[in-house]
Image (cartoon, coloured by chain):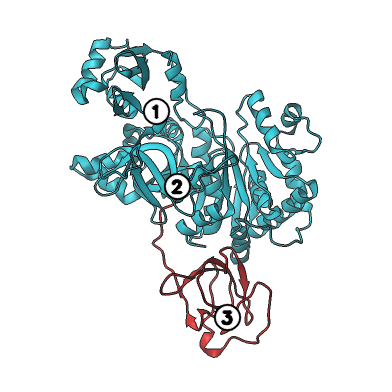
Amino acid sequence: MKPGTRLKSATCDTEVMVIRAGQGTIECGGAPMAEDKQSAGEPAADHAQGTLIGKRYVDAEATFELLCVKPGKGSLAVDGTPLVTKDAKPLPASD
Amino acid sequence: MNIALFLEMAAQAAPERTALVCDGARFTYAELFAAAQGAASTIRQSGADYVALLDESSEAAVLALFGAALAGVPYVPLNYRLADPDLAALLTRITPCLLVGDAARAGMLCEDPANTLLERADFVTRARAAPRLEEADPGLGVAVQLFTSGTTGAPKAAILRHTNLSSYVIGTVEFGSAEEDMARLVTVPPYHIAGIAALLTSIYAQCRIVLLPAFTPEGWLDLVAKEKVTHAFVVPTMLARVVEAIRAGTPADVSSLRALSYGGGKMPRELIEDALDLFPETAFTNAYGLTETSSTIALLGPEDHRAAKASQDPKVRARLASVGRPLPTIELEIRDEDGTVLGPNQAGEIFVRGEQVSGEYKERSALTADGWFPTRDAGYLDEEGYLFLSGRADDVIVRGGENISPGEIEDVLLTHPAIADACATGVPSLEWGEAVGIAIVTAPDCDCPPHDELCQLVRARLRSSRVPERTLVVDTLPYNEMGKLLRREVKGWFGA
């Protein structure tokens, strides 16, 4: 998956931009995400935490990083493992 | 990612928030995004390969930036202060273009019929009326092309890709992090990287952008009070003029100003100390960056400022004159001429690497094979990793094989009460290859101190190799409009 690719959820309104990615399937609501809108029903119950616009989502190894550009009801995962939000220390405004 | 997505996200998350205030015009985030989409279809319809701006800051500059991004063509803000022949030469490098701003001047300088020339108001009206561009992905090509100021030769076309700028924004700002009342005053010209970066980071944070098209200290203070500005960026010259205006009794209410950042040139130590006293409640941040690095790569934050000012330790105090530490998202090294990486307190050339670093010109990339950008800026890191700048690598005076930074000599000269301004430069020397020459501007009603006295002053504070061989007394030193000292011109005065 190339950085800069915009992916859409098949189970909710979520859209993400790929910032970095490795080997594996990016999923939302338990179903694979794709560049074109697919329909796979509602998010699976254990993948329905929701996404927040502007949040960055990463895996434990930081191989994957996704930026949520449109929020939805499903939650993000790679090969079934949930992604977590990345909290960076804010920097003072410099320009 | 494409920078236009930042505006789309802000419009989605906070449609009713005020995005932009300029000369009485106000846009919400939803309105600004809609107008940017209209601008994109206007641009696409013109068939232009570039969107040029020949104008001061206004809503048109913002619409041109994001309209160009949505249309997938580079945005090229031009320096309207350039002389006609220089500007004409740049215009021939960006045809066919849609040019916004001084259409009459552009038409006179470049008669290419393929260009579309629109006055500011005309462009804004069309953008607001045009339908949105119904089209696929504008891609991730060049977002911004900036002609570098050319203090060291002919202007180069520096290229910033969407990926460079978006990495900078995502890496340094949290989306939607602006408090409800946050207002950023943007006053640097639109063709300066700090002006572009300010628009992008402000929109991503969702703050209210207050534009001041042409800087005057009175206008700046007036807007701070009227719009309850909370954040602002200034170049040192602007800060000096604001401080001067307040001292001269210009009405000033800066109580809303929580943060003031500065950069773009060397900040005199005295000026920043004065400013810290005049704005006791304001958090100061010093930013260092280049066009080729998508703006800031190092910063000295508010806590660093306070710690340095309050410290008794001369090492910590000295950090007030540093540009702080590199951003966590980039790598920074100091290297000598052979490319060897230097340790703390050893001066050399600053190299940077990271996703925000473009290091790319239209003609060629300046990056090394492994992605490092040689900034041509000279400097060193102290033991704690604070970066100190010592001028352009090209400005270093090489006297008998010894590297001398002009800044250290100037700092010493400026401690003399009779000296208002000073520039040190390399002058030809039979004995040393190059020796130190100084150009001096005397303080009002002062005579220039005798050459011997200046030599003694430098010798007492620095090494004897720094002692000037030649002294020139001048009325003023040459600066560009961003307050950058044009050392090459001074060098020319010595016949070098």
Label 3 secondary element: loop
Measured in 3D between alpha carbons, the distance from the residue under mark 3 to the one under mark 2, in whole angstroms, is 36 Å
Residue drawn at the location 56% of the way across and 29% of the way down: B154
Where does the image place residue B51, in percent across and percent down from the top left? Answer: 69, 43
> Which sits earlier in the primary sequence, circle 2 or circle 1?
2
Which residue sits at x=72%, y=27%?
B109
Badge 3: chain ID: A
- Disc 2 marks which residue? B296
Report the front residue among B465 and B52.
B465
**How many angstroms separate mark 3 from mark 1 (CA)?**
58 Å
Label 2 is placed on what type of residue? Thr
Labels 3, 1: one chain: no
Q: Nearer the viewer, residue B495 or B32?
A: B495
Position of residue B492 in the picture relative to residue B417 (left or right): right
10 Å neighbourhood of mark 2: few (<14), some, or many (≥20)? many
Query: In the picture shown, does residue B275 fall above or below B183?
Result: above
* Badges 2 and 1, same chain: yes
Label 1: element kind: helix
- Residue B457: image location, x then y, percent: 22, 19
Residue linked to disc 3:
A73
The quadrant the C terminus of chain B occupies is top left
Q: In the orientation shown, which residue stands out farthest toward the bottom?
A: A45
Q: Tell me if label 2 and label 1 are in contact, CB under 8 Å.
A: no
Q: Amino acid at mark 1?
A: Asp
Q: Residue at x 32, y 45 (%)?
A: B341
User: Which amino acid, mark 3?
Assistant: Lys
Label 1 marks a residue whose chain is: B
**Percent position of residue B346, x then y:** 27, 39
Q: Which residue is mark 1?
A: B395
